[in-house]
Amino acid sequence: MWSCEDIEIEGEEIERYSYTCTGDIDRLITPCSSAVDGDWSTKLEWNTTYIGDFNVYIIENFTVPSSVNRVKWEFKAYHKNKGALMPIPMEIFYWNGSSWKQLYALDDQDHKNEVFIEILDIPAESFSDNKISIKTCIRYSSHVAGLGPPQRLWHYVEYFEGKMIRA
């Protein structure tokens, strides 16, 4: 006899068991935990007084039940582009057991100056001993440019949250 607890629901969230933040986290005005707190209204925010190029990496680790054979990664971010050139302001990778493989790359013209949500299929090769690791890299670039009065140019991604869901 089966019980309701045995039924797997498509779209059900898979819990994260750990995370790590590295990179230029001292350039943020919010703690890295804002990107993994389960609250889709909080986010990683850059301190926009800095000039230069910076990266922050968030690595999230999940244990996937052995009965699950397909999962998706859903995330929310804000892409601010006010003139600075940056070919890939955000990338997402998965660990295949031996190296990081790119899952997603945000083009500098995609979702320009808007909040967006994406849902990505996670390849089966990412399941290593029922564990999945996702690495998100967000970038910040700010420069002063122009002839005449200097202008600040920004290009960055603010990351709200990501979650692993059953497909």
Image (cartoon, helix red, strand yellow):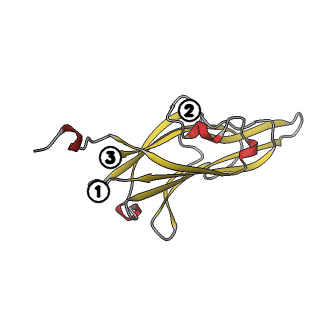
Q: Residue at x 42, y 58 (%)?
A: 131
Inter-mark Cα distance, 2 to 1 = 33 Å
Question: Image height check: is 124 above or below 166?
Answer: below
Q: Crowding at label 3, few (<14), some or many (≥20) Cα neighbours within 10 Å?
A: some
x and y percentages locating residue 164 in the rendered image:
41, 46
Q: Residue at x 14, y 44 (%)?
A: 2
Looking at the rendered image, the disc whose residue lies closer to the viewer, 2 or 1, is: 1
x and y percentages locating residue 9 in the rendered image:
26, 41
x and y percentages locating residue 29 in the rendered image:
72, 35
Where does label 1 land, which residue?
Answer: 69
Where does label 2 land, which residue?
Answer: 114
* Residue 42, image quadrant: top right
Inter-mark Cα distance, 2 to 3 = 27 Å
Q: Residue at x 50, y 31 (%)?
A: 40
Q: Amino acid at mark 3?
A: Arg
Q: Amino acid at mark 1?
A: Asn
Inter-mark Cα distance, 3 to 1 = 8 Å
Q: Earlier in the sequence, mark 3 or mark 1?
A: 1
Q: Amino acid at mark 2?
A: Glu
Q: Earlier in the sequence, mark 2 or mark 1?
A: 1
Q: Earlier in the sequence, mark 2 or mark 3?
A: 2
For residue 166, the mark is 3
